[in-house]
Each structure stands twice: as C-alpha cells, then as structure tokens.
C-alpha cells in the first residue's frame, strides 16, 4: 500500500509538472510575444486546460498529506515564505484568466499578475526540488532547520533551471497548438531555450554529484538508470530535428519525454528515500489503517475518474486554435 | 499583547478561513438553487426558470472561482503554519482532507465544465443531472470538512502512539462521530439560508427599481418562502448543536453563556459585558431559570461556570459570547423577514406595495453571511485553547521555527491580494446583478478557441457592450 501511494504521488507530481509546466511556461513567454493578438492566441492555447492542469497540484498535495503527513509537514513548513509567495502567484494567475477579459482599465494589472505568478510558481517549484536533493535538515522526522534553510545556491540554480524547462515545454505547446503567429514565435525562441536547458541539465548533474556523492554509487548500483539520459538525449535530438525542419508534430511529445527522463533519473537516484537521505517512503507513510481507508475511495474510484476526466478534456479541446478571430 | 508566531498564525488562519467560508456558504446554496430552478423548469416548462437559472449561473461562476482559489491556501496552511498539527494528526486529518480534495475535484471539476458550457450540448435531463452532481459535489466537500472539523472538536476513534501521533483505530467512529450529524446539517442549512436571502434580496431590489419585475418577484417570493421553511429547521439544528456543546465541550458552553460561576438553577444571560480579568460580567441582563432550561431542559439543573475550569483550559470569553449572540440575532431577524414576506406573498399584489418591507429585504443579503461567520467564530474560538479538543493544545500545534516577521509578512501579502481579488470579484458580481436577468447576446469570442465555450461570465469586452455592463 505504501508503494501504491508512493506511485500515485509520483504520477500526480509528474502529471502536474508536464501539464501545468507548459501553461506556466506560456505565462513566462507571454511578455515576449509581439502584441495583443499574439498574446490572446497564446492564452487561447491554454485557457481550456490550465484549470485542470493545476488540480494536479492539489491532488499531489492531498496525496502527500493523506499518505505521507510527515513529509507534508516538513516540506510545507520548510518552504514557508516561498510557498506563500507561490500560492499568491497562482491565485493572481488564476483570476487573471477570468478577470483579464472583464477588465476595462485594469488589464495590465491582470497581465502582470499572470506573468509574475507563472515565474514565481516555476521558480519556487524548482527551488524546492533543488533543496530536497541537497537535503533538508531533518532529525527524527522533524524539520530542524530555519525558514531560510532552503535558499542554497544550488536550490536557486534549480529554480532557474525549472523556469527554463517550463518555458521550453510551453513554447512547444503553443507552437503545436497554433498555425501562424505564436508558432513562429515558438520556433524562434525554442533553439535558445533548448541550448540553455541542455547546459543546465549537464551542470546540475555535475553539481548534484559533487554535493551528494552517494548518487554516484546509486548510478553504478542501478545501471538501468543510464537509460534516462539516453532516452533524454534521443528526445533532445528529435526535438532539435523537428525544430530545424519546422515540424510541430512531435514537439510537445519530445519535450515531455525529456521531462519524464529527468524525473525518472531524479526518482531513481533517491528511491527509496522520499526526503534524501533522511526519510524513506516507509518512514514517511501514514499507518496502514490510514492508507487503506484512503485507498478504498480515493485510490480506487476518484483517481481513475480524475485521470479519465483529464484525458476527455484534452480530447475535446484537441487540434489547433482558430486564429482568424477579430482583433 | 505580544505578536507571537502563535498568535499571528491564528490571526492568519482566522483571516483566510473567514474569507474562504463566505464563498462556499454562497455556492453550496446556489448550486442547490440552480438544481431547483432546472427541476422546476423541466417539470412546468415555464421559461422564467431558464432565465433565472442562466442569470444565477453567471454569479455562481464568479463566486465558485473565488472559493476555489481561496480554498487552496487553506489546504497548504495546515503544513506551513501548523506543521506539528499536520505531523501529529496527519494519519487522521490527511485522509479526511484528502477525501475532501478528491471528491470535490472528481464531482465539481468534472461537472463544472458541463454546467458552465454544456447547456445547449446535452439533453435537459442531463443538464439537470449535472446541476445535481455539482450540488452533490459541493455538499460532499462540505461534509468532509465538517467530519474533519468535528473530529477536532470531538476526537474519537484514534490511539496515541508513544511519540504523540494520532493513529486511526476506527474510521467509522471518526466519520460517524456524533458531532457530525448535527454540525453538518447546521452548516448546509446555513449555506441554503444564506443563498435564499441573497436571492430574495436581489429580487426585492429589482422590484423596488421596477426592473426585471417578473423575475424579481419570482426571486423574492421563492427566496423568502424557502427561507421561511429552512430558518425554523436551522434553529432546531442550532439547538441540537448547542446540546452537543453543552455535553461535550462544557467550557465552550460556559463561555458562550458568559457564565462564570456554577449555578443551580442557572439563569440565562441575554446580554452582558464579560470581564475576564476579574472573572465576572461588568453588566448583565439575565432571565432566571432559563439557563437550566436551555442547557438541560430542566428547571433545576446545575450548569457549570468558567471558574470550574483551570484558567489555562478556558477559552477566551468575549468572542464566543458576542459572536453567538450576533448569530442568533441574525437568525431571528431572518425568521421575521422570511415569515412576514411569505405571509405577504399569499395576498397577490400586497408584497409589491409593501415598499418598506422590500427595502428591508433588499438590505438583508449579508445576514446569512454574518450568521455563518459568527457561528464559526463561536465554534472555533470556543474550542481554544485546544486544536484537538482536550488532546492537543493550539500552542503545541504551530510550526516551531517560523518567526513573527515571516508570518506578519504573509498576512500582509495575503491580505493585500485577497482585498484585490475580492474587490474586483465583488465589482464583477455587482455588475452582473445590476445588469439583471436579461437575455445576453452570444459573447464575442476574442480569438479564443471556438471549441472552448465562452469564458464565463462574459468572455470579452464584447459582452460589456452588448449588455450595458461597460463602464
């Protein structure tokens, strides 16, 4: 049961990163678009789905609290300030979608909230991953650091890295979802973003091995992990070729595979630790009575339903956005 | 008073939860109201129900959105500010709140899209079913919150481990906690009454302005009659909740009553000025014997006073005492308005001519919100100094290492942003109310995906022009 809930958590976090990742990325690219027409098309490419994407954050948080309360209490309290800033960012960003079109004089305000919210959310999420890789000070299941323990150079570097990654997957999404204007913009920014991301991934791997030597032992113990960089490299090449040939068919898929490979590499380096290297998933898990109770309703019914719902929404809103709207 | 991290965390929680509760109180009732309108429309075939339903749907959309975004902060606060609570009660509260998130999203998220955009894409019975499912989703979500809160008020079905962690031993004892079955209906009825008064007040406002007269009158009459039935039921449930508090949380009961000394027979204080420093009331107006009657249904029963409890186990007195009286006052006022209005509504044109009454009704919309909020203040402040009643003190549940500055900073930040979105949200709701239930032109899509149905309410500047909503 512990393994089941750990996989549910991993799946919901991965889905969140992939799905909200691209719409946060669109938010980050938003100020660089040329003019209102391009911007509203960029928004049109994400407006039907962003809400559903963000629910995976709530599903992840609910799963974490429900199944692994020890980790929930450590992570959320350790990231007190950045987390609040992120929540505020997400709120501003969420209302911006609805309010932007109703506003007469305050559109710039909502646009600013939309963009700032996207950057802040991406940055905080990346920082959290970085801080966890580096290791939060935990003794006996209780966080013993202070409220700035998270802010190491390595964690901040990871925050910037995730921003680049989200921006890239966001650029892939708008390019694939539109025919002319945002697509051209996407093709223009993608090579630069890819180069930055590649540089980041190499740098972060070297840096994290330097901080956490046990990782290297993991990789020699578990040679299957080498598949991750391999798959990532293939996806990267595929993506580069698509951009070079101006083909948008596999853009998003390629970006998604890169993310999945990075996620798998990260998970594979640290399992069975949930907080490296202080709490394993078994130490962090709720007692069996709690996990069973959660399983019979949430695990068996609600989770498959939510997955199905996500698939249906993406199916309904498939295809490219129509671009001949009035401007 | 020192602004300790504990106090600031409590202020922050109180602020965010008070802000949040306003929206569910409204949307739980509105979802049921929309279901009711759809059902009436389907059964009678009258067009007016469709017009009313379309109108309230737009307001529901804005309120629902604000409820969702403000609710996300609540979920995270358990970990950020109350990490010890999350760690120690996580095995119980985690799954309960997990169920809340899961059911809320499964039902609300899945059907909300159809509710907003699917009116003309699904058969009428399926649309009615959609309304029902959204309504069920909002109520279920409230149910899990009430189960969780009732467990904190009346912990059952758990064992404590050596390191102080609450482990569930019987989920049925936790869910079928006796507190839930009075407190959950009390909350749901509060939501229904609140929405009924918002509908009635809107209707009365239109009648006074001579605008959308037919719809306005329908709203006023339906809202008032519904409230006329629900408010007395609510009073009964309120009394049952009071009985539960009397038996299970005597210190809270004494604080609500403003009773310092044990009394036999006890008098009932109507109004007073509690003075905690000197452990007495500075001024009081009391009815003899009534305290024993209300507390124990007896003329002679002994009722406990606050002095029976050690000072560190007593809740603060002033907030539960006054909040409870405000809640009851709002309830009685609503009862009077609802009964008078329903009576007038049976005499044809009489309600139309009763302008003073319509003015009072149109001003009555905040009563339900005030009663709901003060009811929560009574329950939650009265629970102090415990976060899990009798088991875990609030001061031991707070995150240990966060400084006052950080919490104060987030309070200011959250306060600023909430003020901003609340201000604009209310402005947009007001614009919708002012425009009234008039048929709106198909909104002008602004380069949006045609497969994405219109963003609600009013997708674009085009709508403002079409409905006269523009500034």
Image (cartoon, helix red, strand yellow):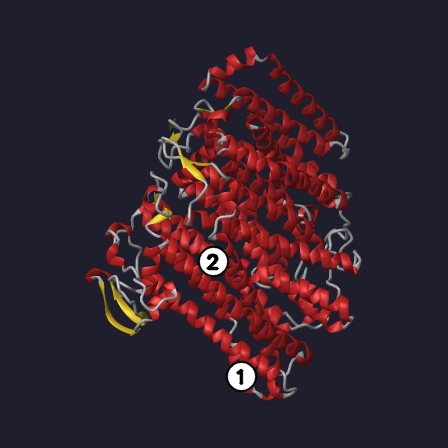
Q: Give a yes or no on whether discs 2 and 1 share a subunit.
A: yes
Measured from the top left, where is residue B77 in percent x and y? 45, 45
Q: Which residue is mark 1?
A: B357
- State left or right for residue A31 relative to residue B301: right
Of residue A62 and residue A327, the one placed in the foreground of this image is A62
In this picture, residue B201 sits left or right of residue A319: left
* In the image: residue B203, left or right of residue B89: right
Q: Is residue A112 visible?
A: no
Q: Is residue B207 above or below residue B126?
A: below
The N terminus of chain B - image quarter: bottom left
Is there CB contact under 8 Å for labels 2 and 1?
no
Residue B435 horizontal/vertical position (percent): 64, 73
Q: Nearer the viewer, mark 2 or mark 1?
A: 1
Determine the chain carrying the residue at label 2. Answer: B
Q: Foreground: B161 or A199?
A: B161
Circle 2 residue: B19
For label 2, the crowd category at 10 Å Cα-Cα, with few meaning under 14, some 14 to 19 and many 20 or more, is: some
Q: Secondary structure at mark 2?
A: helix
Decide: few, some or many residues near mark 1? Use Cα within 10 Å; few <14, some 14-19, many ≥20: some
Q: Which mark is residue B429?
A: none
Q: Is residue A245 visible?
A: yes
Disc nearer the start of the sequence (2/1): 2
Mark 2 → mark 1, Cα distance in angstroms: 30 Å
């Amino acid at each position: 049961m512990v393994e089941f809930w750990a996989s549910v958590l991993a799946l919901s976090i991965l889905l969140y990163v992939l799905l909200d990742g691209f719409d946060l990325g669109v938010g980050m690219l938003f100020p660089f678009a040329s003019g209102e027409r391009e911007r509203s098309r960029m928004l049109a490419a994400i407006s039907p789905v962003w809400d559903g994407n963000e629910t995976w954050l709530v599903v992840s948080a609910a799963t974490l609290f429900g199944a692994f309360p020890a980790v929930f209490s450590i992570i959320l309290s350790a990231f007190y300030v950045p987390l609040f800033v992120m929540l505020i960012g997400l709120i501003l960003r969420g209302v911006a979608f609805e309010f932007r079109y109703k506003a007469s004089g305050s559109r710039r305000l909502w646009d600013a909230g939309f963009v700032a919210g996207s950057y802040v959310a991406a940055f905080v999420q990346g920082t959290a991953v970085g801080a966890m890789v580096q290791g939060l000070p935990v003794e006996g299941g209780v966080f013993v650091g202070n409220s700035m323990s998270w802010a190491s150079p390595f964690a901040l570097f990871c925050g910037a890295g995730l921003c680049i990654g989200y921006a890239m997957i966001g650029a892939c999404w708008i390019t694939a979802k539109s025919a002319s204007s945002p697509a051209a913009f996407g093709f223009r920014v993608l090579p630069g973003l890819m180069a930055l991301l590649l540089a980041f991934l190499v740098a972060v791997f070297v840096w994290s091995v330097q901080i956490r030597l046990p990782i290297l032992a993991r990789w020699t113990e578990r040679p299957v992990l080498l598949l991750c960089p391999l798959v990532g490299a293939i996806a990267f090449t595929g993506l580069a070729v698509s951009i070079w040939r101006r083909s948008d068919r596999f853009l998003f898929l390629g970006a998604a595979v890169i993310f999945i490979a990075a996620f798998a590499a990260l998970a594979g380096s640290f399992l069975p630790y949930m907080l490296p290297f202080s709490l394993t998933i078994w130490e962090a898990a709720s007692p069996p009575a709690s996990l069973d109770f959660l399983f019979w309703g949430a695990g068996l019914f609600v989770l498959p339903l939510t997955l199905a719902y996500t698939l249906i929404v993406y199916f309904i809103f498939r295809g490219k956005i129509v671009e001949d709207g009035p401007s | 008073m020192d602004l300790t991290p504990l106090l600031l965390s409590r202020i922050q929680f109180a602020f965010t939860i008070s802000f949040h509760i306003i929206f569910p109180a409204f949307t739980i009732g509105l979802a049921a109201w929309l279901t009711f309108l759809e059902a009436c429309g389907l059964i009678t075939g009258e067009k007016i129900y469709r017009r009313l339903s379309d109108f309230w749907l737009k307001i529901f959309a804005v309120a629902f959105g604000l409820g969702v975004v403000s609710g996300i902060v609540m979920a995270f606060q358990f970990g950020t500010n109350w990490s010890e609570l999350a760690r120690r009660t996580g095995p119980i509260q985690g799954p309960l709140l997990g169920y809340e998130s899961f059911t809320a999203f499964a039902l609300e998220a899945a059907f909300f899209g159809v509710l907003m955009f699917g009116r003309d894409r699904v058969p009428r019975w399926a649309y009615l079913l959609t309304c029902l499912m959204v309504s069920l989703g909002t109520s279920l979500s409230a149910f899990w919150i009430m189960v969780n809160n009732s467990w904190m008020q009346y912990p059952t079905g758990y064992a404590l481990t050596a390191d102080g962690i609450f482990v569930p031993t019987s989920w049925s004892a936790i869910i079928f906690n006796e507190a839930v079955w009075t407190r959950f209906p009390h909350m749901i009825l509060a939501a229904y009454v609140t929405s009924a008064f918002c509908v009635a007040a809107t209707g009365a406002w239109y009648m006074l302005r001579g605008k959308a007269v037919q719809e306005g009158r329908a709203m006023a009459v339906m809202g008032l009659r519904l409230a006329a039935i629900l408010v007395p039921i609510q009073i009964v449930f309120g009394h049952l909740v009071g009985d539960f508090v009397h038996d299970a949380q005597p210190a809270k009961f004494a604080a609500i009553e403003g009773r310092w000394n044990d009394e036999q027979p006890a008098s009932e204080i109507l109004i007073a000025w509690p003075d905690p420093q000197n452990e007495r009331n500075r001024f009081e107006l009391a009815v003899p014997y009534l305290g024993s009657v209300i507390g124990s249904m007896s003329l002679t029963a002994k009722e406990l006073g606050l002095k029976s409890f050690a000072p560190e186990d007593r809740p603060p007195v002033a907030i539960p005492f006054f909040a409870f009286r405000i809640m009851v006052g709002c309830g009685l006022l609503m009862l009077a308005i609802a009964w008078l209005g329903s009576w007038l509504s049976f005499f044809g044109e009489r309600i139309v001519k009763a302008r003073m009454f319509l003015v009072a009704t149109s001003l009555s919309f905040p009563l339900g919100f005030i009663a709901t909020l003060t009811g929560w203040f009574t329950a939650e402040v009265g629970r102090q100094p415990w976060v899990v009643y009798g088991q875990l003190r609030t001061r031991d549940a707070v995150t240990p290492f966060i400084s006052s500055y950080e919490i104060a900073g987030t309070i200011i930040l959250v306060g600023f942003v909430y003020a901003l979105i609340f201000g604009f949200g209310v402005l947009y709701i007001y614009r919708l109310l002012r425009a009234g239930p008039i048929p709106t032109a198909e909104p002008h899509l602004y380069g949006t995906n045609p497969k994405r149905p219109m963003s609600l309410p009013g997708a674009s500047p085009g709508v403002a022009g079409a409905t006269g909503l523009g500034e």
